[in-house]
Amino acid sequence: MACSRYEYVKSYEQDDSILPNVWIVIRIDGKKFHKFSKIHDFEKPNDENALNLMNAAAIAVMEEFRDIVLAYGQSDEYSFVFRKETQAFKRRSAKLLTYVTSLFSTNYVMQWPQWMKDRKLNYAPCFDGRVVLYPSDENLRDYLSWRQADVHVNNLYNTAFWKLVLDKGLSNQQAEERLRGTFSADKNELLFQEFGINYNNMPAMYRKGTILMRKRLELQPGDKTRQVIVPLHDDLISSKFWKTHTELLGKYTPGSYKTTAELPRLLTNQLEQQFENQAIIS
Amino acid sequence: MACSRYEYVKSYEQDDSILPNVWIVIRIDGKKFHKFSKIHDFEKPNDENALNLMNAAAIAVMEEFRDIVLAYGQSDEYSFVFRKETQAFKRRSAKLLTYVTSLFSTNYVMQWPQWMKDRKLNYAPCFDGRVVLYPSDENLRDYLSWRQADVHVNNLYNTAFWKLVLDKGLSNQQAEERLRGTFSADKNELLFQEFGINYNNMPAMYRKGTILMRKRLELQPGDKTRQVIVPLHDDLISSKFWKTHTELLGKYTPGSYKTTAELPRLLTNQLEQQFENQAIIS
Amino acid sequence: MACSRYEYVKSYEQDDSILPNVWIVIRIDGKKFHKFSKIHDFEKPNDENALNLMNAAAIAVMEEFRDIVLAYGQSDEYSFVFRKETQAFKRRSAKLLTYVTSLFSTNYVMQWPQWMKDRKLNYAPCFDGRVVLYPSDENLRDYLSWRQADVHVNNLYNTAFWKLVLDKGLSNQQAEERLRGTFSADKNELLFQEFGINYNNMPAMYRKGTILMRKRLELQPGDKTRQVIVPLHDDLISSKFWKTHTELLGKYTPGSYKTTAELPRLLTNQLEQQFENQAIIS
Amino acid sequence: MACSRYEYVKSYEQDDSILPNVWIVIRIDGKKFHKFSKIHDFEKPNDENALNLMNAAAIAVMEEFRDIVLAYGQSDEYSFVFRKETQAFKRRSAKLLTYVTSLFSTNYVMQWPQWMKDRKLNYAPCFDGRVVLYPSDENLRDYLSWRQADVHVNNLYNTAFWKLVLDKGLSNQQAEERLRGTFSADKNELLFQEFGINYNNMPAMYRKGTILMRKRLELQPGDKTRQVIVPLHDDLISSKFWKTHTELLGKYTPGSYKTTAELPRLLTNQLEQQFENQAIIS
């Protein structure tokens, strides 16, 4: 065969199978999204549509890879959690990593118009991805808590910062100086005193990020239940979250809600629509 | 700090730096592109526009990552060769792998309308990627030869197969049976005898795939030379290729052509245009 | 500095730190010990002294590396279990692996005369070693059960085989044929019917292998307790074992026995002596 | 089968095959040999017998593993170079690493009495080992040059240091202070002026370390040539070394000397003897 002389090069591919029985987390992250968000006029400190575009791309990834039991997104990053037992792609690290990263990337571009409307996508965005392994359930919870603590710290800062810049007319540098060395309590107080804002009343998606999980529910009372991917903006640091969604750390089967009546507060309008259109898998 | 208790999870990220002084090849590959090409009405056996869309996405990747000295594409796959000495992203395997895969993926979607015109992109495509390391120059040449021998074998078969199906009206199964056990010479003969086709006169892009390299050249005689990414459809198995493009295995600097006059046969019209518009980096 | 020009080669050493929070098992295994045991006249099917030499070498390894909480040996192999949290040698895989393998190897040679008496060591033995990671306690238990099930199957076979050869005068081939296709029950029956042997009364070390653990105990009633490495020949497949030695899977501190009075059945004479002489660490 | 329920744990062993076509260097290193050499009264700054014991252990390793084309030792370390193409143990990293480390370790203990005579081995020594990969011949040369530059720098320092301590009666601290900040030329001058020593006349084994290679030679003029492992104390930093021993970087076959007459200056008496006794492999 013509190609046989060269085929030995295939043997240079090295096995990268992931150790069995560990949580596999794939986190993707926007490359140079500071600049990207500026060029595309993202609202500051949070652009609801841009966040929902991230959520929509992540939902598409979860629809494709059924062994992802939870995804968590905030800012320009998204973490996907494969269940410990997954045999998807024989647990080959590069396969899992690139499929998730590629599919997220293409969905981000394809769904851009739907969420960003008349804001044109000026150039191709790029996401990096990494695989991190967590042996214990506690490790996994701590990982997710780490990411959610991160969004809390950053969003509180950004909320105060942009209020000072946009409403008070401070320069970026002045706002930075004003906030330097302040604690959470200080920033809460500043928002309340100077802007009449109760931080805890800000939209949960901004304060908590977005959790995606599979749930079975009736779309209309009395309907057959269907499996859908549901976005939540809950506190996942608390143990209450894990007691409510016991399927995550147990033997995995999608959890269930009785009716959509339990969900409304969770779903942004846009996601509700998408959820009806396409997140329904059966 | 609020998040410090959880920050230990960051230490679970493992170092994946690539051994120094080896060629780094990243090959991306379309996921389920057999089905994808059917749904999107790709011409058989080769869809010139679909191939040029691949080429255009690959050019965008090379424009971004300057340490890629050569890329080679055929069918639904593309290989990117980073020079041995690259320090890009500290040679971290996952970073290199995901940036290349993600940027290729987003460009494929963004540039779809430009190449595929009124064929709508029905769903988000997905590419996997892998990293393979080659210690010696000979290994690298053999790797690229392996991929080019692959396109030769496949394209000759596909050309004959689709002629039998499309022109002779054979069913897929009948065409398969007709070609079972034939050698290259047999298929060449079949094309010539039954369809009057000299296989060697088929477009070089179909027979040889596409090689992308950086070259400095004058766009117009007398112009300042500029660095561009040039597509070739040459035989890279022969040593002539490597003698012509000595920059590849030597101490790397982009090679040079005197004028575009040397290039015309290389460039499809579409790529020429793009090359004028955007491949010019300086 | 004279050597600086070459020092870059140090950067080719790659990080091999082991993922945190997993059980680290290092198993060493005699190279070509079938031949080695023949040349050194090991008694068949079990050579008590040769096994105790293995045990003595393993005890020396446990004395040196305090994060080994359990070791399990049978035939010419020994497994060492590092606690999940160990930071020994920064969890660098090659360091842990080679220290254990090297120290076991040198102790095997040094303690040879003490156990093998007038049998001379004719050439240098060699052991290979491997690192295997187990994320969960259940995995670890199953690993150890796997090794103990292995010794059961092999030892029952070997006991019957050598009885047929040594007592009945069968050739090796005849003995093999006689045992082909038999189940455990058949071999038990054969031993009982033809040789009057109740397999369950054979020495536990042969049937169960040797478990090494750290325990605190009084050497004489009323003495201050001291930490020693204790050999057991118990059934570790049963959950009883893990309920008795709760320190293994809990937050590790050496377990305790009240007095040596609880131990006698566990210790061979030879190990008792060694245990008094040198296994006493504090 | 009794053990099948547990056998799944075998699948947790991960593939560690080494990339093809790279030089594989395994370096072993004495653990806490500063203390070990003190307790065993090694002569300072160099103990000829202790070095030859290292050499003898390394020769035993080379006799066993035929794909080691060169070994280089100095102080308490030894590097073993496997040829690029080796398929020994399917290039599994842990296998290669532990076999070399274990066999070196057991030989060190077994051959101790032969070299150290009435100095008793008080406790089991221990060596760590690591695998380092070098893609190019230049890398390999630079690696070995790095180790030889290291022995030069250390030995010159140690020679001066111990002269000051042993002959001049300085304390360790005084000797350190005296040498602080000195260059090679200063230390050469000090040895010459104060002790009448021309450093370049010191034994080559101390200044250059020991290189082991396979050679074919006639033991007596006219004899059939035989393959033996030959120790050299040459300068391997210079290109002369590599021009003399062209087999190393070429397609490997053992090099040849015409007669032992070319060797005498290379061999210590002790190694000559061993070389006659046991290094003769065919």
Image (spheres, coloured by chain):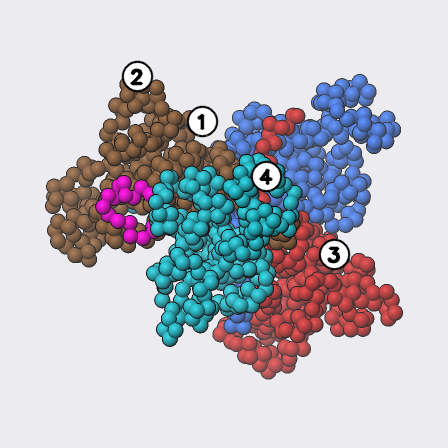
Chain colours: A red, B blue, C cyan, D brown
Identity, as a three-letter code, of the amino acid under mark 2: Gly
Please tell me whether mark 1 sits on a helix, a strand or a loop.
Answer: loop
Q: Tell me the quarter of the image containing the C terminus of chain C.
A: bottom left
Q: Nearer the viewer, residue B101 or D101?
A: D101
Identity, as a three-letter code, of the amino acid under mark 3: Glu
Q: Nearer the viewer, mark 4 or mark 2?
A: 4
User: Chain for mark 2?
Assistant: D
The answer to whether the residues at label 4 and label 2 have Cβ atoms under 8 Å apart is no
Give the number of the disc on residue C176.
4
Discs 3 and 4 carry the same chain letter: no
Residue located 64% across and 51% down the image: C185
Q: Nearer the viewer, mark 1 or mark 3?
A: 1
The picture places residue C236, in percent across and down from the top left corner, at 55, 60
Reading the image, the residue beneath label 1 is D251
C249 horizontally vs C41: left or right: right
Give the number of the disc on residue A63.
3
A187 horizontally vs D250: left or right: right
Q: Which residues are magenta?
A: D110-128
Discs 4 and 2 carry the same chain letter: no
Q: CA distance from mark 2 to mark 1?
A: 28 Å
The picture places residue A280, in percent across and down from the top left corner, at 80, 60
Please tell me whether mark 4 sits on a helix, a strand or a loop.
Answer: helix
